[in-house]
Amino acid sequence: MKIKILFSVFLLFYIAIIVRLVYIQVISRDFVGSDLYLKTKRLTSERGKIFDSSLNPLVLNQNSYLLYLEPKKITDKLKLIKFLSEKLKMEEASLSSYIDEKKVYQAVAGGLDETKKKEIEALKLEGVNFEYQMKRYYPEASLSAHLLGFVGKNEKGEDLGYFGLEGYYDKDLVGLPGFLESERDASGKPIFIGAQKKVDPENGRDLVLTIDKSIQEIAKRKLKEGIENYKARQGCVIIADPYTMAILALTCLPDYDIDKYFDFSENYFKNSAISDVVEPGSIFKPLIMAAAINEKKISPNSEMNEDGAVRVGEYSIKTWNDKYEGRVSMTRILEKSSNVGMVWVGEKLGQDELYSYMQKYGFGELTGIDLQGESPTYLKPKNNWYKIDFATATFGQGIGITPIQMIRAFAAVINGGNLMKPYIVEKIKSADKIDIVKPKVERKVVSGLTSEIIKKMLVSTVENAEAKWDRPKGYKIGGKTGTAQIPIAGIYDPSKTIASFIGFAPALRPKFLTLVILKEPGTSPWGSETAAPLFFEIAKELIVYYNIVPEQ
Amino acid sequence: MSKLYKLLFWMTILAMVVANIYLFGHSIKVSDEILALEKKTRDLHVANIGLVKEVSFLSSLVYAEKAAIDLQFVKKGTPTFLNKLGVALKN
């Protein structure tokens, strides 16, 4: 009898359990939901890293923490506000506004490092917690701020790359988050025989750049010195391999502190090397000269009579110093940077060919460089050009181009005639494969012979220029100065110029091509007295860095 | 015979109860181990990221510049001994 009673009690007990289980799992399954025991956790992917050409890290990730409050668990509100405001350097009033007892979660401050987290944890404040995050770390600080861009937030509060490489390659860098579905008991422990499903996150792809951090450091250091010495408003240096248009260094100043980008206005984020549309000035002359030689309209030894200013319609075009040498060769026109001579070359070339070469050099189209923020330039239709436009274009005035367009076109005339697509990223690495970016020839602009001729003319331009520079001894260097006046409200202000120099070394087979631009230099408006000496300072260090043997 | 069946029945029940208790205890232990391993993996990942950061800082130009300044390895600090070996030998 006793056994029967005991059996009945057990039976009733089991029936009660079964009824309850049927109620939870069948009758009210939609109401109860699987989240009672099935916990899903988002596994964040690690954003891709960025390395220079020698695999030195330029951008990594670092540990970071988000401090959040659980207002319902706060026991001593005043103490919490007092201590946290000290540690986080926040106003007590604004911290107080975060504490809403109706809320269960309130994010307060992100980007805290390990030390700060430990300091706050040591205070043992109730209701204060941390959530693990990652943020960007820049071992070389702001060495390449404009190039790299930065990671901010989108409207949903998720990481998003802005400007430079972070902006351009955001989708490659961001990766895919994974998730972990795991049946857990009431205390959060995994249920041994429960379902466990894990999808690993796919980390972002790493970028290997064409940038060499040592060259980047040389370029930035020298540009900073140059801007200070010549009292310029801003400046840019672009160094590229002329045969591939792989960018070795690219820097513009002033730039911004990449770690504290939020303290800077948007103007600082703009990379002038790809975004500023400027009149190039005399550094444009070799392009027109090369076009005329390529079309066999002139040769380096052709002569013209430079006997005074030339009139084009109602305008009078003079040489920079209003001095004229009579009969001069084409090489001499470049050496003395004669505007009058270039107008003559332009006339020899013809308007149709001149316009056609402007298009061939890629003006009026994007270069396609893999950086966010490249500005398009506009080459107005040929039938809208006046005679004076064709004349001034020969010496780089009256047209607007970006510095990256300029260096790309110049590379084409010294590399054998190939217009290349400039690029910064040479490898994109993921866990299972490496994509290699190869140099891309857009089109042939001038012949190899023309290229050799123009290189010799540019070496002569450096060696016989009217200004004498402190050049590296024993090396043949080609290049051209430029001084472009800046149009303000349609009028050129002679005191405000863009001084520039574009040059390459060693002349026989150039290892580097460098464009130096100084905007509104204060000590002298001329490129020959500002940008050119800066170029030679950079060239000296590059020659040592590359261990280039003297040619002479 | 019926006694034997009863004995077998109760022994089976007892064995199942013991197995159940063992499995319950074991599952708690395994759960704890999973939790501990999850934490360890997370900590290792965090520590690894911290170490990568430290190594990259030590190989950076920023650190090299700082070290050069600390060591007074600047133009002013260039040892004259290299040019004046006699002075170096004397010292």
Image (cartoon, coloured by chain):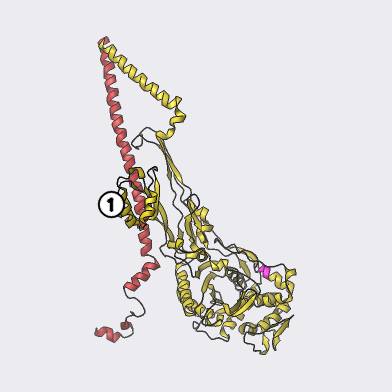
Quadrant of residue A240 in the image? Answer: bottom right
Q: Position of residue B79 (x, y in %)?
A: 32, 81
- The residue under label 1 is A123
Q: Answer few, some or many: residues within 10 Å of disc 1's Cα (few below 14, many 20 plus, some between 14 and 19).
A: few
| Residue A329 in view here | yes
Q: Amino acid at mark 1?
A: Leu
Q: Position of residue A426 (x, y in %)?
A: 52, 61
- Residue that protrudes farthest toward the front in the picture: A93
Check if residue A94 falls in the magenta segment.
no
A380 in relation to A503, above or below = above
A64 in relation to A15, above or below = below
For the stretch drawn in magenta, the main secondary structure is loop
- Segment colored magenta: A358-377
Q: Position of residue A241 (x, y in %)?
A: 54, 69
Chain under callout 1: A
Q: Secondary structure at mark 1?
A: loop
Quadrant of residue A31 in the image? Answer: top left
What color is chain A drawn in? yellow
The chain letter of the red chain reads B
> Who is closer to the viewer here, A241 or B42?
B42
